[in-house]
Amino acid sequence: MEGQGDRRILVVDDDPAILNVWRRVLGPKWRRPALDNLEKKLFGAAPPSPAPEVGFAIDTASQGMEGYQKVIAALEEARPYTFALVDMRMPPGWDGLETVLRMLEKDPQLEVAICSAFSDISREEVAKRVGRIDLQWLRKPFDLEVARELAWKLGEQGSHRRQAR
């Protein structure tokens, strides 16, 4: 696992290149883009002091069952994931829907987002089966800034969901 802190994320995707992109995009040296943009608007080109770096502790899994097992292990360690990004198609094992359903069965407070280029099931059907109308989707290929903002949003929601239980 990379990074530190309580914002642990799990990325489940069968493509090693995608896993590496997520590590780079959300790793420990990432700064929240919206904060940078706000600082520029408020303080001009040079903010008075550097904004803190934001990063997520990232675990990865190349198949749904492996991701599910990591969710269980994280719960057993009392260090649950804040959110999971899950690919929809991951042959030959579980698809993203099966993976998300099983993860949420074990950890109902886990925030999840589907990150996929293709799905054999509509967004509405997935949201209905998962039981979350606010289920987030990120379509591949994705804009890195949009991906970062989604991760920040999921991190906030996940932290609030865990605190509210």
Image: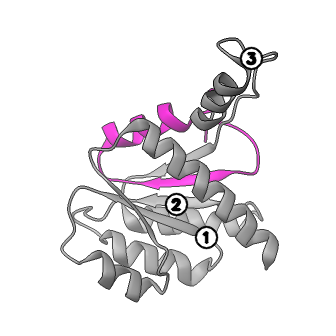
**Mark 1 and mark 2 residues within 8 Å of each other at the beta carbon:** yes
* Sequence-earlier tag: 3 or 2: 3
Seen from the viewer's position, the closer of residues 61 and 137 is 137
Label 3 – label 2 distance at C-alpha: 33 Å
> Where are the magenta residues, as a range?
1-30
Seen from the viewer's position, the closer of residues 132 and 90 is 132
Q: Quadrant of residue 42?
A: top right
Task: Assign a secondary structure to mark 3.
Answer: loop
Does 117 sit above or below residue 142? below
Q: In the displayed structure, does residue 4 sit left or right of residue 45?
A: right
Quarter of the image with the C terminus is: bottom right
Quarter of the image with the N terminus is: top right
Residue type at numbered disc 2: Ala
Disc 2: which residue:
84
Q: Nearer the viewer, mark 3 or mark 1?
A: 3
Q: Position of residue 3 (x, y in %)?
A: 67, 36
Label 1 – label 2 distance at C-alpha: 7 Å
Label 3 – label 1 distance at C-alpha: 35 Å
At horizontal 70% and vertical 11% (from top left) the residue drawn is 46
Q: In the displayed structure, does residue 137 sit left or right of residue 48?
A: left
Q: Quadrant of residue 12?
A: bottom left
Does 104 sit above or below residue 12? below
Q: Is residue 20 magenta?
A: yes
Disc 3: which residue:
47
At horizontal 73% and vertical 20% (from top left) the residue drawn is 43
| Mark identifier at residue 110 | 1
Q: In the displayed structure, does residue 50 sit left or right of residue 19?
A: right
Residue type at numbered disc 3: Pro
Residue type at numbered disc 1: Leu
At horizontal 55% and vertical 84% (from top left) the residue drawn is 105
| Mark identifier at residue 102 | none
